[in-house]
Image (tube, rainbow, N blue to C red):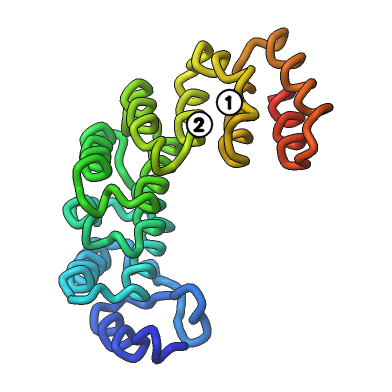
């Protein structure tokens, strides 16, 4: 496994930069990151290695995943410019990229970075891939400060053809769009399983006197145990 991931090369480069990783799935000979990597010298090493990684063709997936995961754990904001300027290059590791963005975008630049991500998802050829759009929506759910409620809901509605109604339902819950949720109370059974559960969960923001009868009826009548569990949870949360 180590050879397949290019571990030998990674060891030489990381030791050269005083950077000792702990790659997921290859834990034995890697050590944890020392406190020295939280110093300016250590942060410079992280930037240099990440810049070298994303400049290679093709992208080395193992190293890229490790660097993004480690940066997420350490809240390493210095990688922000490289990440947001290379979203297309990072398409193959977009799960790790999305988790990094959720954890490491500063509040001061949240709106700016959110606009960059939204534009990438709407306009880029790669950004239009359903997998990338799904993780982009996840970023905006975790970080509401990166995109306003109206913009996030419109974005999710624009992705409905590829992703279904689930993203819109989650954004409706985030933005407390009660009328939109009420409009689906009679037709929620017409949607697919993931969409139905998201609509039920979105109903948790309805007033107690409105949500309890509706969700209670779902809990009693549905044959899907997951829908029953979501309805039960949404009634009390």
For the residue pair 217 and 27, the one nearer the viewer reads as 217
Residue 15 appears left or right of 211: left
Q: Residue 15 carries which label?
A: none
For the residue pair 76 and 195, the one nearer the viewer reads as 195
* Residue 204 in the image, given as x and y percentages of width and height: 64, 22
* Residue 123 in the image, given as x and y percentages of width and height: 19, 42
Q: Earlier in the sequence, mark 2 or mark 1?
A: 2
Q: Is residue 78 visible?
A: no
Q: Secondary structure under badge 1? A: helix
Q: Secondary structure under badge 2? A: helix
Residue pictured at 28% horizontal, 62% vertical: 39
Residue pictured at 26% horizontal, 67% vertical: 46
Callout 1 crowding tier (Cα within 10 Å): few <14, some 14–19, many ≥20: many
Disc count in the image? 2
Q: How far apart are marks 2 and 1 (CA)?
A: 6 Å
Q: Do the residues labelled 2 and 1 touch (CB within 8 Å)?
A: yes
* Residue 74 in the image, given as x and y percentages of width and height: 39, 57
* Residue 112 in the image, given as x and y percentages of width and height: 21, 35
In the displayed structure, 231 sits above or below 87; it is above
Callout 2 crowding tier (Cα within 10 Å): few <14, some 14–19, many ≥20: many
For the residue pair 104 and 35, the one nearer the viewer reads as 104
User: Quadrant where the C terminus lies?
Assistant: top right
Q: Name the residue under label 1.
A: 202
Q: Can residue 150 be seen in this view?
A: yes
In the displayed structure, 158 sits above or below 116; it is above
Residue pictured at 26% horizontal, 34% vertical: 108
Q: Mark 2 points at which residue?
A: 170
Residue 15 appears left or right of 178: left
């Amino acid at each position: 496994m180590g050879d397949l991931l290019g571990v030998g090369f990674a060891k030489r480069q990381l030791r050269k930069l005083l950077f000792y990783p702990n790659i997921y799935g290859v834990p034995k000979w890697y050590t944890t990151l020392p406190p020295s990597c939280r110093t300016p010298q250590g942060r410079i090493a992280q930037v240099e290695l990440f810049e070298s990684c994303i400049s290679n063709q093709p992208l080395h997936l193992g190293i890229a995943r490790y660097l993004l995961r480690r940066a997420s754990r350490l809240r390493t904001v210095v990688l922000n410019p490289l990440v947001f300027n290379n979203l297309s290059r990072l398409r193959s590791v977009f799960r790790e990229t999305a988790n990094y963005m959720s954890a490491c975008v500063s509040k001061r630049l949240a709106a700016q970075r959110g606009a960059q991500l939204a534009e990438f998802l709407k306009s880029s050829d790669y950004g239009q891939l359903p997998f990338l759009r799904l993780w982009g929506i996840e970023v905006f759910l975790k970080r509401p400060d990166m995109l306003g409620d109206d913009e996030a809901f419109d974005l999710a509605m624009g992705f409905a053809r590829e992703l279904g109604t689930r993203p819109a339902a989650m954004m409706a819950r985030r933005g407390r769009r009660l009328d939109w949720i009420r409009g689906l109370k009679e037709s929620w059974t017409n949607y697919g399983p993931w969409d139905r559960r998201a609509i039920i969960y979105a109903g948790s923001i309805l007033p107690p006197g409105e949500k309890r009868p509706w969700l209670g009826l779902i809990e009693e009548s549905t044959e899907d145990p997951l829908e029953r569990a979501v309805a039960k949870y949404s009634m009390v949360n």
